[in-house]
Image (cartoon, rainbow, N blue to C red):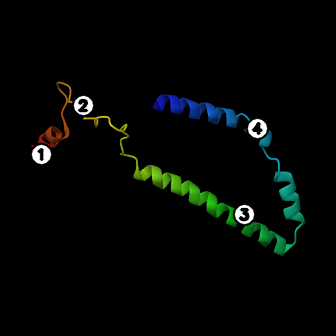
Amino acid sequence: MKSRLAACGLLLALLLGSFAPAAYAQGCVMCRASASAADEEGRKALDLAIFVLLIPTVSIFLGVFYWAFRRRNQTWVEPGAESPQPPDPLPGELDDAALWRAYRQ
């Protein structure tokens, strides 16, 4: 189920990304022309507008990374499924306790 969801997400991202080249630099020339034609007060207003638009963008970006950081070690178990157990060490492999004992000697 997860791999199917991941594949659909990847397909959607590729599909949406294919429309991006048509959107490159649509407003840069007009923005630069209007900023260069503005007086000092207009430039300050444009700087403030850029800052105001930056705040929600950075907040969302940091929020997503905070959420991902908080859930980095969480395991996802289907409802009603038995909880996964860690695999037994292979012959010749040491578990954490054995590594700690070997380190302390």
Mark toward the start of the polypeptide (2 vs 1): 2
Mark toward the start of the polypeptide (4 vs 2): 4
Mark toward the start of the polypeptide (1 vs 4): 4
Residue type at numbered disc 2:
Pro
What residue is shown at x 82% (from left), y 52% (from top)? 28
Q: Residue 89 placed where, x, y %?
A: 20, 30
Tell me the quadrant of the picture where the C terminus can be found. Answer: top left
In this view, 42 is above or below 72: below
Label 1, on which residue?
A: 104
Q: Are marks 1 and 3 in contact (CB under 8 Å)?
A: no
Q: From this viewpoint, which residue is outermost toward the front?
A: 80
Q: Nearer the viewer, residue 57 or 44?
A: 57
Label 3, on which residue?
A: 50
What residue is shown at x 53% (from left), y 57% (from top)? 62
Q: Secondary structure at mark 1?
A: helix
Q: Residue 63 placed where, x, y %?
A: 52, 56
Q: Residue 14 placed where, x, y %?
A: 65, 33
From the image, state whether disc 1 or disc 3 is nearer to you: 3
Q: Secondary structure at mark 3?
A: helix
What residue is shown at x 63% (from left), y 57% (from top)? 57
Whole-angstrom CA distance, mark 1 to mark 4, is: 59 Å
Label 2, on which residue?
A: 87
Label 4, on which residue?
A: 21
Q: From this viewpoint, which residue is outermost toward the left?
A: 105
Q: Secondary structure at mark 2?
A: loop
What residue is shown at x 52% (from left), y 52% (from top)? 64
Mark 3 Cα shell of 10 Å, populated few (<14), some (14-19), many (≥20): few
